[in-house]
Amino acid sequence: AQSVTQLGSHVSVSEGALVLLRCNYSSSVPPYLFWYVQYPNQGLQLLLKYTSAATLVKGINGFEAEFKKSETSFHLTKPSAHMSDAAEYFCAVRDTGGFKTIFGAGTRLFVKA
Amino acid sequence: DAGITQSPRHKVTETGTPVTLRCHQTENHRYMYWYRQDPGHGLRLIHYSYGVKDTDKGEVSDGYSVSRSKTEDFLLTLESATSSQTSVYFCAISESGDSSTDTQYFGPGTRLTVL
């Protein structure tokens, strides 16, 4: 069965610092992997997705994620945090050929001035 | 932004009453989904639809039913609301469902409180 684990329900960084949000997945077949962002009182918005092409995926707002099969990880990074990055971030997995997307519990990112 | 609206946006109801939430899309996408979001659980799939009158259960479907009589509308019904169904409900749509290029687009959510 598919599953997603996001390490750390809360992450706090200073403005300008590196952002690293961790995601590990479990899947019996090659997966599709996603990162979504949710701003307060809004729905989820797709940041980026991995669909078995390049292992380093670039998304919107300067975020990127690297698929590492050996580590079953898909960590999200951004070199320099901005105050506007404060939000909740969700990692998600979907089996190839499947309809159902499984979401992690989410990581809330705080950015300090 | 994808054209997805949810109504109502907020609702407070009492235990035992029926509640219907509506999701409306203007994108003509085939697939529609209902999720609930609870702290510490992320989003969990309640039901989904892969066409008009074609629906299936998700991982937390107990106590919920859905209907899709038109491509653009997907209704979620709580037949007899319970306090455990207090949550934020999100509708999502996608064009193809299972292709590598498929992306889910989310509505703004409905905050439901069951007293």
Image (tube, rainbow, N blue to C red):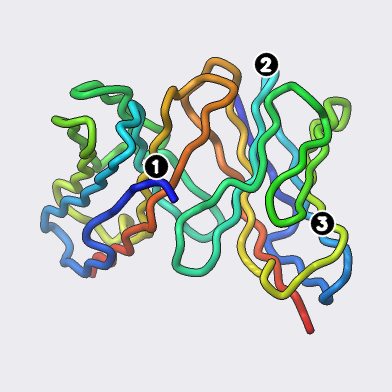
Identify the mark at residue A34; answer none if there is no mark: none
Query: Label 2 neighbourhood size at 10 Å, few (<14), some (14-19), many (20+)?
Result: few
Tell me if residue B110 comes above or below residue A59 in the rendering. Answer: below
Please report whichever mark, 2 or 3, sits nearer to the chain's N-terminal start. 2
Left or right placement of residue B11 versus residue A112 in this view: left
Disc 3 residue type (three-letter): Lys
Proximity of marks 2 and 3: CB atoms separated by less than 8 Å: no
Label 1 marks a residue whose chain is B
User: Residue at point 21% right, 51% down?
Assistant: B21
Query: Quick check: A5 left or right of B13?
Result: right
How far, Cα to Cα, is label 1 from label 3?
27 Å
Front tag of 1 and 2: 1
Share a chain, discs 1 and 3? no
Q: Are marks 1 and 2 on the same chain?
A: no
Residue A67, horizontal then vertical, whole percent: 81, 33
Percent of width and height locating residue A6: 70, 49
Q: How many marks?
A: 3
| Residue count near mark 3 (Cα–Cα under 10 Å), binned few <14, some 14–19, many ≥20 | some
Q: Tell me the mark number nearer the camera, choosing from 2 and 3.
A: 3
Residue B12 drawn above or below residue B8: below
Q: Report, in whole angstroms, how far the alpha carbon at label 2 lies from the one at label 3.
A: 28 Å
Residue B15, image quadrant? bottom left
**Whole-percent x, y for residue A22 in the image:** 78, 49
Q: Amino acid at mark 1?
A: Ala
Residue where numbered disc 2 is placed: A29
Quadrant housing the N terminus of chain A: top right
Residue at 62% from the left image edge and 66% from the top image edge: A87
Residue at 30% x, 32% y: name it.
B28
Badge 1 marks a residue whose secondary structure is strand
Identify residue for label 3: A78
Residue located beneath label 1 in the image: B92
